[in-house]
Every structure is written in structure tokens, then in C-alpha cells.
Image (cartoon, rainbow, N blue to C red):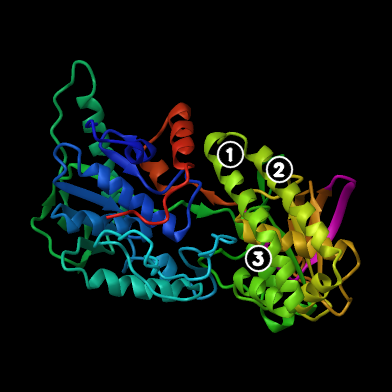
């Protein structure tokens, strides 16, 4: 590495001249992906021989990195197995995204345009992805704006879509082998591999190819975080139970259908995806920010009470992020601490009649229920807004303040599924759960399983030692800037 190289290269490096933007990450919002890619490119351009860069994967991070590189005149090739970039987001109309939607309770969480429109924000580089929305927008609407921006670039990267991933895998593995050999002592002679573009069987979606071969100086892996864990599993025996929920990004669910207000839903997991689905099943809101605004608008007196808590919540969030950066191996301790703080604050608020009435007004009317199962005794990695709203609902329920006319929420901490089947009866799922007090049967019409990403694609291309993986995970947990200054 050159003398100018800094944290961005260290945090993303996974092999000589190979950088990974998709695995072992803590900050994974849409904005974080853009910023992480731009920071990597800024430092990569200071490296020797950075004339041609191959980017594997045309998602948010890959597109942002490709645009930043191409804008400097660097020959850049993005390869994508799907027919268009941003394939994950393009087909998803039921999940919402935005650069600042989870910066709550910071003062700028409301506007979801990027780069920020405020005059006091620093100017972003010219090739920064741009989209406009005052509120969180659907993933598909976001992808549409991103594709329009990408196709409008003056100097776009070459984007090859519909490629054969096996050919790319062979090339990357040969690339890694070559450069690892160059670092050996003595270094054996190995011919530098070329990527035969005709062998990829892809279509030129954007830009131009200068040759039928691509001789990369560096490779950026941006193939995503891997398949999500949606199959119900016994974590003790480490085996699947043969029952799965719909994919977070890939399969529409029925959690907000009119009929589900009178049906039983089971949510498994303590992370952000699980908390999002708890809120979607219990309330009519598409996004948690809508629920927060509804609470504030319920009564002028309540708005004052809630806003008075924001400085404390903001300090809690700042402390949580800093501890996460400097103590990356203590996930459980951090989650327990912030959960306890949120629960205490939610408990104080839930004793207020106005808060109880406002929460009740946000819950869907019906005889249904949501059972939420978390293996630990606390929630996991989750944004503060989702965490706090779920705690606020749970505290109101615990006080018996919610009328039976509303859907019920039952939180089960410290339990896990041990058996499951689809009996084909009125209730679609029959699940046995090991609770702290014994094994109980549960029956559900709908299921959401959120066990996080499994097996990032980059892991299939480059193998890291445990020490290297821990080091990268630690560095990638450091808080990122909101915008990369020009």
C-alpha cells in the first residue's frame, strides 16, 4: 500500500489487490454502502497501477464505486449476473429505504434525499449517487431513480449484465492466486490472468468495452451480504426445521393484509429485520417513521413529552455506536445496555395516559396477535427507532393499557424453536418452542424468520483467516461519515 492509504483500504482489503464491500459489515444502510464505496475508491486511486478495476456485483455499493472510479478516467468494468443493476431493489415494493431514515432522533432524519439538500452540508463528489424524496421510498422507486442517475453520467463505467458467474469466479480466484504468489519469497513466475469478456456471455448494459479481454489491476467484490436466514432452525442442535418464512427483499409477505389483523403471526429473530416485521404486522404503517409522526400528532401535549426525550435518546444512540466501534466483540453486552435504557425510558412513558392512547391508536384493530421470539434475553443489532417503538408497545401491553379490540403483541425472550411443521389445518404453522419454563406449542397463520445474512458471495472467492476476519469486522464497524466531502 502507498503512504497515502488509510482506513478505507484496510477495512475492505481481503487479499492482495482485492477489496470486499459486502461482508463482515456493521453499517449497512443504503447511505453507508455509498459512502463506504466512495471512501475505498478515494484511497484506491492513490495506489500504484490503478488503471483498470473490475467490480463484481452491480448493487448499491458496486454502482457507487464504479461511478466514482469511471469519473476519474479509470477504466472500470462492473459485472452483474442479473439483467440489470440493482436487481434486489428493483423488484421490491414492500420495503422502504432512505439515507437518513434510521438517523432518528437526529435533527436531520426526516428528509430522505441524497446528497443532503441543506446548505451547510459539504459538497459531495460529482459522481455521488443522487435521489430525491422527502420521506422513505420503496426500494423499487429508489432503484428507478438510481438507474436514471447512472445512465445520465457523463463518464459512466462499463456495465456487463447477465454474465456467467462461474467464469468470474474462476478469474477472481486466479487473480488472487497470482498476486499472493507475487508476495511470496521467492516469488514464483505466474502469468497475470486476463478476463475473457466474450466468455462471460453478457450484454453491455451501459458504457463501452475497450477490448475483448479485461486485465484488472484491482478487484472490488460487491456481490451483497449473501442469502438471508429465513428457515426456522434449532440453534442448539444447529439444524433446520423444514419451515421457512418469505425473504426480506425477495418475497412479498402478507403481514399487512387486511385478513392478518384477525390472524396469528410468529416473528423469529431479535435483529432489525425482525423488529421491522413486528411493527409492520402490528400497525398499518409502511415505515416506522410514519408511526413516530402519528404518535407526535396524536396530541400537542404528547408531542412535547416525546420531543423532550429526544436528547437522551440521541445520546444513547451516540454512545451505542461508539461502543460498537471500539468494542466490536461485545455485541451482547452492548445490546443488553441499550435495550435496558430503551425499556426504562419506554416504561416511564407508558405510564402516561396520553402515551397509552396514542399507542393504541397506532395498532391495527382485530383479534389477531403477533408472537415475537428472541433466543437471547435482549434484542440484537437494530436501529434505535425500531427498537424504541417495539419497547414502547411492549411496555404499554405489559401495563394492560391496550384494549382487546387491538391486535395483541407477546414478546418471548430466551426461547427458540425445536420442532416445526405445516399441518394443513386452519393454522398453517405448528411450532414447538423451548421457553425458559418448558416446551410449548404455538400455531400461526403467518411466519417471519429473520436470522440475518448467511454466506456472503465474497467468502466463496476469498478465504480469510479468523484473525483477518476479526480485524476487518472491527474496522468496518467504525462509524462512517454521512457524506463524503468533495
Residue 400: in sight, yes or no?
A: yes
Q: Does the magenta stretch include residue 440?
A: yes
Question: In front: 112, or 400?
Answer: 112
Give the residue number, with chain letter if any, for mark 2. Answer: 337
Asked if labels 1 and 2 touch by Cβ distance under 8 angstroms, the answer is: yes
Q: Is residue 428 magenta?
A: no
Start and end of the magenta stretch?
435-450
Q: Residues within 10 Å of mark 2 (few under 14, many from 20)?
A: some
Give the residue number, with chain letter if any, for mark 1. Answer: 323
Distance, label 2 to label 1, CA atoms, is: 11 Å
Disc 1 on helix, strand or loop? Answer: helix
As displayed, is residue 292 above or below residue 228?
below
Q: Which residue is drawn at 42% across and 59% down?
A: 31
Disc 2 on helix, strand or loop? Answer: helix
Query: Residue 111 placed where, x, y %?
Result: 48, 71
Asked if labels 2 and 3 touch by Cβ distance under 8 angstroms, the answer is: no
Give the residue number, with chain letter if any, for mark 3. Answer: 277
Amino acid at each position: 500500500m502507498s503512504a497515502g492509504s488509510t482506513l478505507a483500504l484496510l477495512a475492505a482489503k481481503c487479499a492482495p489487490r482485492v477489496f470486499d464491500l459486502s461482508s463482515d459489515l456493521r453499517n449497512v444502510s443504503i447511505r453507508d454502502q455509498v459512502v463506504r464505496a466512495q471512501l475505498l475508491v478515494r484511497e484506491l486511486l492513490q495506489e500504484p497501477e490503478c488503471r483498470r478495476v473490475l467490480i463484481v456485483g452491480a448493487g448499491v455499493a458496486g454502482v457507487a464505486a464504479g461511478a466514482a472510479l469511471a469519473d476519474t478516467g479509470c477504466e472500470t468494468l462492473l459485472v452483474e449476473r442479473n439483467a440489470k443493476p440493482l436487481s434486489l431493489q428493483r423488484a421490491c415494493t414492500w420495503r422502504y429505504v432512505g439515507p437518513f431514515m434510521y438517523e432518528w432522533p437526529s435533527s436531520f432524519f426526516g428528509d430522505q434525499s441524497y446528497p443532503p439538500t441543506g446548505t451547510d452540508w459539504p459538497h459531495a463528489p460529482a459522481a455521488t449517487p443522487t435521489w430525491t424524496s422527502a420521506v422513505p421510498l420503496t426500494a423499487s422507486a429508489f432503484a428507478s431513480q438510481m438507474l436514471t442517475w447512472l445512465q445520465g453520467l457523463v463518464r459512466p463505467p462499463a456495465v456487463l449484465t447477465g454474465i456467467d458467474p462461474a467464469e468470474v469466479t474462476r478469474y477472481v480466484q486466479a487473480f488472487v492466486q497470482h498476486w499472493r504468489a507475487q508476495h511470496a519469497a521467492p516469488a514464483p513466475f505466474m502469468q497475470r490472468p486476463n478476463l475473457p469478456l466474450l466468455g462471460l456471455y453478457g450484454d453491455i448494459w451501459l458504457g463501452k468495452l475497450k477490448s475483448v479481454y479485461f486485465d484488472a489491476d484491482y478487484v472490488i467484490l460487491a456481490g451483497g451480504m449473501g442469502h438471508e436466514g429465513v428457515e426456522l432452525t434449532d440453534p442448539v442442535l444447529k439444524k433446520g426445521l423444514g419451515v421457512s418464512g418469505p425473504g426480506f427483499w425477495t418475497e412479498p409477505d402478507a403481514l399487512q393484509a387486511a385478513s392478518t389483523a384477525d390472524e396469528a403471526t410468529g416473528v423469529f429473530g431479535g435483529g432489525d429485520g425482525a423488529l421491522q416485521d413486528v411493527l409492520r404486522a402490528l400497525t398499518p404503517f409502511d415505515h416506522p417513521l410514519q408511526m413516530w409522526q402519528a404518535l407526535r400528532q396524536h396530541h400537542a401535549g404528547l408531542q412535547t413529552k416525546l420531543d423532550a426525550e429526544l436528547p437522551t435518546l440521541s445520546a444513547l444512540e451516540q454512545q451505542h455506536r461508539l461502543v460498537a466501534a471500539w468494542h466490536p466483540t461485545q455485541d451482547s453486552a452492548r445490546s443488553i445496555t441499550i435495550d435496558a435504557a430503551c425499556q426504562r425510558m419506554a416504561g416511564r412513558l407508558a405510564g402516561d395516559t396520553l402515551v397509552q392512547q396514542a399507542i393504541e391508536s397506532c395498532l391495527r384493530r382485530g383479534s389477531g396477535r403477533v408472537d415475537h421470539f428472541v433466543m437471547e434475553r435482549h434484542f440484537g443489532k437494530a436501529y434505535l427507532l425500531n427498537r424504541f417503538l417495539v419497547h414502547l408497545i411492549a411496555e404499554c401491553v405489559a401495563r394492560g393499557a391496550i384494549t382487546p379490540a387491538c391486535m395483541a403483541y407477546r414478546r418471548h425472550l430466551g426461547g427458540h424453536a425445536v420442532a416445526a411443521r405445516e399441518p394443513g389445518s386452519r393454522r398453517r404453522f405448528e411450532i414447538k418452542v423451548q421457553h425458559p419454563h418448558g416446551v410449548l406449542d404455538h400455531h400461526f397463520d403467518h411466519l417471519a424468520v429473520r436470522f440475518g445474512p448467511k454466506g456472503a458471495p465474497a467468502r466463496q472467492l476469498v478465504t480469510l483467516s479468523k484473525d483477518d476476519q476479526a480485524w476487518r469486522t472491527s474496522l468496518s464497524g467504525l462509524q462512517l461519515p454521512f457524506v463524503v466531502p468533495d
